[in-house]
Image (cartoon, helix red, strand yellow):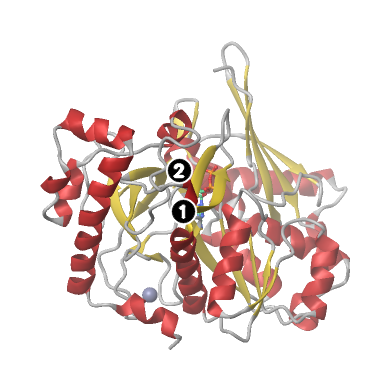
Amino acid sequence: MNPISQKDYIDVAGLRKMQLAKLQELIPYEYERVPLFRRRCDEKGVKPRDLATLADLAKFPFMIKTDLRDEYPYGLTAAPMKDIVRFHCSSGTTGKPICIPATMADVDIWSDGVARCLAMYGIMEEDVLQVSYGYGLFTGGLGAHYGGEKLGCAVLPTGAGNTEKQIMLMKDLGVTAIACTPSYFLHLATTAAQMGVDFRRDTKLKHGIFGAEPWTDEIRRKIEEISGITAHDIYGLTEIAGPGVAGNCPYCNGLHVWEDHFYPEIIDPDTLEVLPDGEQGELVFTTLDRRGTPMVRYRTRDISRLQTEPCKCGRTMRVMDRIHARTDDMLIVHGVNVFPSQIETGLMKVPEIAPHYQIHLSSTDTLDLFEIKVEVVPEAFSDNIRDLEALRKRVLAAVKTIIGLTPKITLVGPGTLPRSEGKIKRVIDNRKK
Ligand code: ADP
Ligand code: ZN
């Protein structure tokens, strides 16, 4: 076993004790240094000394994304600037980005999470890791980079973009693992095919480390089918560290949460009550070790579940379900709740459909217009209107069975929809608000 993985197997009683001890240090630290947290605790009438058991954490207030915007740039920073070594900012779809200053120890904890994920995937010091996540304010690039170096891999920091050159380097340098968004990997795969490069024949690629955006099991299978690699899931978010908060092991379809650093809870997003393990709800994290911008009970908006069965691999860290939806990416169309991942699952049931699609919503005064544009694989794209019409009907049926609605399905030719170098934007919602 790689020594870095030893922590994954700590006995559960020891883990709970460690989590409580870390929380009992974190809460007073945060209370003393972050006025917003202190104010909220005071309003609730809760004091740091009220944390006597792990269950007591539920007495403390939540943090949410708008807190980060409202307190931008330094309101939630708990460490002095002399201790800060790094900033990361998350995309922030509207207005100001959110900014997370980190200390050297914070960066190290984050790298530890990524390195333990890589080790769990079976990646070793001998591996050559190409990092095709974007570098910069986005956490993907530097997160995978530092994690790879910590494990001892040879890291190739290509960043995103310049796809043909990436494929050339992958071949020439004998890259064995690649880290990028699943959507960018699909783009890489198409470009490789156009260049006459066959991943199985011409490269040594074995592992893909994919995250930063939701991707269904169907897309995962498709990626593995076209490239012959194993597609591993890595989860994380800027507010809590970046990628490497959790990763999936080969023994289960969920992700082990590195809960010695990142304490997870699942809450009901409406009542805000903590739910027992086994129930689905909104994922909440407390950063047990971070001191630059600690987060106490941060509501991720990601929907998941903490599994109750211990994983067969022997790791004691709890397993969360893969993330297929965020509370804020749910679409309400004709009064029905629809998640983009449900549409993706339906589309991918049809073999002639390529994993490239867009969901368009617009409205007239009285009606929501709901259209799905989706690419057909080159072999199935034909000029024969009748064939295409039959295919369109099959696609519609596959989607309708899952979402119960009848969107307009538009089949488009291979390579026509926009590709992305980072996180893909699949929903274009132009409805009047
Ligand atoms: P932003 O909120 O601006 O997208 P981040 O770049 O920090 O900020 O992205 C974090 C979010 O990306 C997570 O909260 C989650 O919704 C999504 N995400 C990250 N990794 C995964 C993954 N492996 N599976 C599904 N969703 C993921
Ligand atoms: Zn496991």
**Secondary structure found at label 2:** strand
Q: Nearer the viewer, mark 1 or mark 2?
A: 1
Answer with mark 1 or mark 2, whichever residue precedes in sequence.
1
Q: Quadrant of residue 219?
A: bottom right
Q: Is residue 198 above or below residue 326?
A: below
- Residue 170: x %, y % from top left: 77, 74
What amino acid is at disc 2? Answer: Arg
Write the residue at 69% across / 78% down. Answer: 205
List the single residue furthest toward the front: 82
Classed neighbour count for the residue bearing mark 2: other residues with Cα under 10 Å, few (<14), some (14–19), many (≥20): some
- Residue 287: x %, y % from top left: 35, 54
**Distance from mark 2 CB to nearest ligand 1 atom below 8 Å:** yes
List the single residue furthest toward the top: 365
Q: Is residue 44 left or right of residue 381?
A: left
What amino acid is at disc 1? Answer: Asp
Q: Quadrant of residue 186?
A: bottom right
Q: Is residue 368 above or below residue 204?
A: above
- Residue 66: x %, y % from top left: 43, 31
Q: Is residue 249 above or below residue 105?
A: below
Write the residue at 55% across / 48% down. Answer: 87
The label shown at residue 326 is 2
- Residue 154: x %, y % from top left: 66, 79
Which residue is nearer to you in this view: 398 or 223? 223
Write the residue at 20% across / 73% down. Answer: 14
The label shown at residue 83 is 1
Classed neighbour count for the residue bearing mark 1: other residues with Cα under 10 Å, few (<14), some (14–19), many (≥20): some
**Secondary structure found at label 1:** helix
Query: Marks 1 and 2, Cα distance to the nearest angstrom?
Result: 33 Å
